[in-house]
Amino acid sequence: MTHPPASPTAAGPGAYVIGVDSGGSGLRVALGRVGLPGPLATTVCAEPVRTGPGGIDAGHLLDQLLPAARELLERAAESSVDGAPVGEVAALAIGAAGMATLGERLRAELPGALADALGVRRLALAADAVTAYAGAVGQRPGAVVAGGTGMIALGTDLMEWHRADGWGHLLGDSGGGAWIGRAGLDAAMRAHDGRRGGSPALLDRLRAVFGPADELPGLLYPRSDRPAVLASFAPEVAACAGADPVAAGILRAAAGHIAEAAAAVCPTAARPAAAGPDDGGDELGEGGEVALTGGLFRMGEPLLAPLREELAHLLPGARVTSAEGDPLTGALRIAQALAAGDLRLPRHPTMLFVPLEHATGQRGGTAARDEPRSG
């Protein structure tokens, strides 16, 4: 059965929505309802969605998403006590790693496929940095720094997106896990050679983790997952930082890079006084809000203490917060807002694409640039 095109009419409270987070570790799916915080249920598909010459494989994503979504809807039907129309999905939001640059097939194929299969009335296709933002900050203006193996900063004044870094370990990701790990291994190898700037403490950790130092190139260079291998050494740098000035200096330098990226994207103007507290109407102050999300910041104080100092210098008055939720939470929030007709995050052709609005020319009052602006 082919379902009619999505209607611009907002869905009422209780309507079902689905959020999807597609990343390197697999596909996560959450079922929720409009007006209710958090998911009703979640499920995980352990196989990452394939990427080929044409970009992210839409068919492979659907092969995993559709059975998972139907399972969640069936579970909801079994537990439903209020007579809600189980089976209808008012809105669905997908956040995917690589969506901005590799998501052309998703944008072309998913709207029709999801309408046919699930009767989806509204769809949003987002870069994973956008769902990370929505999970961390919600629909308030501010900035989020997502740190893991890599590092990207994303900010918005609710008019357009501003991006800094996230260019991969060869071109950037400065201050991220791979950057810290590489700097730590460099310091270890300097100690091995007897060069200036070396760290005997980090050399000891290199040997404990990887074996003899002179065998490390043969272990590292053939690996296709070099960024992850480099990032695996970042916790060793943090563990040494309390007693080793070289390790502490690496984390201070990482904090400087992270703070510079946050300052490049963080909006400094407060929201208009007419805005309510739920949509960011509280005064942000001159520094704005900066939320930190991702495994990088689980290093704790060895990284967070110098990062707070750098942010205080570059963004005086900034409120540094921990993320409210993860990217799956963000995808579900976007779906809920889209279903309710209350999505205030800026639309963008590749960062946050809403197919119905793209087709009809409706932009919900927000501006979209051809490319997210850095700085």
Image (spheres, rainbow, N blue to C red):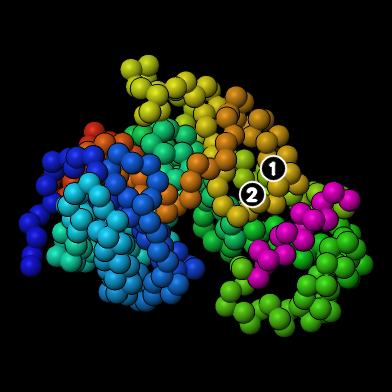
Number of the label disc, if any, that sits on residue 297: 2
The part of the image, by quadrant, that contains residue 103 is bottom left
- Residue 15's x, y, as percent? 22, 47
Q: Residue at x 36, y 52 (%)?
A: 40
Residue 186 seen in render: yes
Residue at (18%, 42%) from the top-left corner?
11
Q: Which mark is residue 83?
A: none
Segment colored magenta = 229-243
Quick check: is 241 in the magenta stretch?
A: yes
Q: Quick one: SS at disc 2? A: helix
- Residue furthest front as drawn: 81
**In front of the other: 265 or 144:** 144
Amino acid carrying mark 2 in the image: Phe
Quick one: quadrant of the N terminus?
A: bottom left
Disc 1 to disc 2, C-alpha distance: 7 Å
Q: Residue at x 52, y 22 (%)?
A: 285
Secondary structure, mark 1, is helix
| Mark 1 crowdedness (10 Å alpha carbons): few <14, some 14-19, many ≥20 | some
Indicate yes or no whether the magenta region holds residue 307.
no
The reply to whether residue 353 is in sight is no
Q: How far across and down, in percent of the image, does residue 66 sit? A: 27, 68
Depicted 319 relative to depicted 303: above or below: above
> Mark 1 or mark 2, which has the lower sequence index?
2
| SS majority, magenta | helix
Residue type (three-letter) at the residue carrying disc 1: Leu
The residue indicated by pointer 1 is 304
Q: Position of residue 365 (x, y in %)?
A: 24, 33
Disc 1 to disc 2: CB gap under 8 Å: yes
Q: In which quadrant of the rendered view does residue 221 lie? A: bottom right
Depth check: give the residue in front, 4 or 292: 4
Q: Is residue 185 above or below residue 366?
A: below
User: Eyeballing the image, is 233 above or below 368?
Assistant: below
